[in-house]
Image (tube, rainbow, N blue to C red):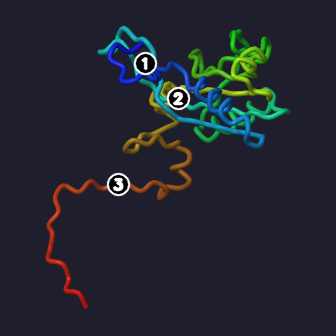
Amino acid sequence: ELANALTQDYNALRHSILPNIMQIFSLNTHHEYPQNIFEVGTVFRKDNDAETGVLEETNLCAAMCTKDVDFTRIKQVLDYALKSLGKECKIVEAKHNSFIPGRFGKVMRDAEEVGLIGEIHPQIIENFALGMPVSAFELNLSRIFSLMKSDRDEYTQMDDLFVEKKILGKYPNLIMRTLKIKSVKVRKQAPEL
């Protein structure tokens, strides 16, 4: 909780994006289904090693709300997102009070947890006054990109971008470098015609 919050509505730092997505679903029950939402945003977690005691990270959350959504459908979206990042992860079954038992898992890269996936528990759906089931995943992009930095044999860093080395081998001109302009001289404007 923040000591100097500007408003009562925003007096805490979020540790997950999923509650915000659920709130959006609850505010949009009058709109047509299916509703598929994603958000990339900042989340916070305690970290005694951080200067402020709080670590800022970037997460990606995606959720689907419709009558026939299930674990398989949201996993297909997760698999596509991970494939586009060039990362393979495995899902380890786990328990979480906000998800249906047996339909929740932790997304793991090697031995590190990088996200979660599952079907939202009916009690949570009722708490948000939703009439439809919801399946969702949330990935910690900061951790995933940090793992990409450690995969030096597979990736190379170009400016702020990580590029898979095998892609660069096939398409060496794919990445264009940005130039930083240090000084600019302004000439007189051309006369108007």
Quarter of the figure with the C terminus: bottom left
What percent of the width, then of the height, locates residue 186?
15, 69
Residue 105, x across and y down, in percent: 70, 17
Res 7 → quadrant: top left
Amino acid type of the residue that numbered disc 2 sits on in the rendered structure: Asn
Which residue is nearer to you in this view: 32 or 149?
A: 32
- The disc at residue 59 is 2
How crowded is the residue under tag 2: few (<14 C-alpha within 10 Å), some, or many (20+)?
many
Q: Is residue 72 left or right of residue 176?
A: right
Work out whether 111 lies above or below 42: above
Q: Residues within 10 Å of mark 3 (few under 14, many from 20)?
A: few
Q: Of the residues shown, which amino acid type is indicated by label 3?
A: Thr
N-terminal of the pair, mark 1 or mark 3, is 1
* Mark in front: 1 vs 3: 1
Q: Quadrant of residue 2?
A: top left
Identify the residue position indicated by label 1 in the image: 11
Alpha carbon of mark 1 to alpha carbon of mark 2: how far? 20 Å
The secondary structure type at the circle numbered 2 is strand
- Picture quarter with the N terminus: top left
- Give the residue at x 66% y 17%: 106
First-in-chain label (3 vs 2): 2
For image coordinates 64% across by 21% down, the residue present is: 116
Is the residue marked by circle 1 packed among few (<14), some (14-19), or many (20+) residues within 10 Å? few
Residue ID for mark 3:
178
Front-most of 150 and 71?
Answer: 71
Query: What separation in Å lies between label 3 and label 2 (alpha carbons)?
Result: 26 Å
* Circle count: 3
